[in-house]
Image (tube, helix red, strand yellow):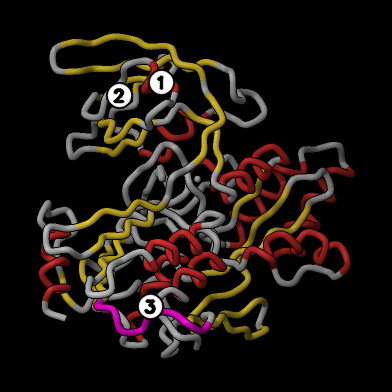
Amino acid sequence: MSGRDPFCQPRRVRHGAALTLVFASVLVTGAATGSFPEAERKSAPDTARSAAPAGHHQEVARAAAEAMAAGKSPVEAAERAVSRSGDRWGAVYSPGEYEELEESLDGQYTGVGLSARRERDGGIEITKVRSGSPAADAGIRAGDRLRAVDGRQVDGRPVTEVVSLLRGDAMDRPAGTTVRLGLERGTRAWTETVRRARLTTDPVSVRGTAAGDTVIKVASFTKGVGDQVRTAVGRVPADAGVVLDLRGNSGGLVTEAVTAASAFLDGGLVATYDVDGDQRALHAEPGGDTTRPLVALVDGGTMSAAELLTGALQDRGRAVVVGSRTFGKGSVQMPSPLPDGSVAELTVGHYRTPSGRGVDGTGIAPDLEVDPADPAALERAETVLSGL
């Protein structure tokens, strides 16, 4: 999807969620966001075939079927129906786009290996180049400016749009196709042609601090991340605290966020949510570390499943939350197949924190307000940790 490539705007209808997900800082390598348990995402298409989808799922499916019968594009008809419904997070995917979304949730993507962000002047700066990626092989470095993609100027464009240009369409521009990048480094300007490749994400990183504590940075909740977090916590020295850095985390698989919560909670409620009015609950597994000092560092790019985790740790008194108010995406999306094989992913409900707080549209307020753009934000979090 969050460049991980992060951006604070809703997904565009179609061409979208997989490529232009909302993240707080942008990782052009791509992650994906979604507020539903993985098992439900995988089973939902079959379930939808056996039972009529509720609410505007029916309207979208009907519009697609009528368009198909009339020899018109069912995808375009579905897109119009989603737009009319006012579903901010609704999206329609072609079969290829939906396959790419599923791959993203599995921690894979097609791209060139760049992370980027939009600067205040509107320019796109490359912030990270993945080792061994096509971009790295081409000699592109962090700090370079990206000026154009396949001849299209990118200055002033939303990062989501730049991500889409870099990654290309899964069907028309798959791995192995080339993309031409206009670059700038200091006074040097040049063009580099790189070949897209199948890459894997590296969403969890761990490092020690000068004080002997550990920072666990989680960029997104793709498949396997929850266990990675639990493994990382298990390796932290017994007398050390943890800063859980969720800045720019666009979310991902809710089940992975719940597994991550299990690293710090001894069972109990993580969140409640509803699917078309049916109330459900998510619980942590027992046996987590409940005594180790913990600070969660968040910002306006902390979204969806990452907010669910933050809210659970805050409500249950397990962590001090430091940073700025989170994004506020607390809605649940479920996929539904359309007659031509495309997929509509529509909002069916919302989740709440253990205390019953709704997150959608409001976000989570930190216990201690810190400007996340301040280079010293992580140091402030470490200072708070030292006092716990």
Say which mark, if any, is on residue 34: none
Disc 2 marks which amino acid? Leu
Q: Mark 2 falls on what kind of element? A: strand
Q: Alpha-carbon neighbours of circle 3 within 10 Å: few (<14), some, or many (≥20)?
A: many
Q: Which residue is mark 1?
A: 149
> Is mark 1 in CB contact (under 8 Å) with mark 2?
yes
Q: Mark 1 falls on what kind of element? A: strand
Q: Is 136 on the left or on the right of 348, as rendered?
A: left
Disc 3 marks which amino acid? Gly
- Above or below residue 107? Residue 191 is above
Q: Is 185 on the left or on the right of 342, as rendered?
A: left
- Above or below residue 132? Residue 120 is below
Quadrant of the frame with the C terminus: bottom left
Disc 1 marks which amino acid? Val
> Is mark 3 in CB contact (under 8 Å) with mark 1?
no
Query: Where are the magenta residues, as a range?
Result: 286-293
- Is tag 3's residue or tag 1's residue first in the polypeptide sequence? 1
Q: Is 205 on the left or on the right of 173, as rendered?
A: left
Say which mark, if any, is on residue 311: 3
Q: Alpha-carbon neighbours of circle 2 within 10 Å: few (<14), some, or many (≥20)?
A: many
Say which mark, if any, is on residue 146: 2
Helix, strand or loop: magenta stretch = loop
Q: CA distance from mark 2 to mark 3?
A: 36 Å
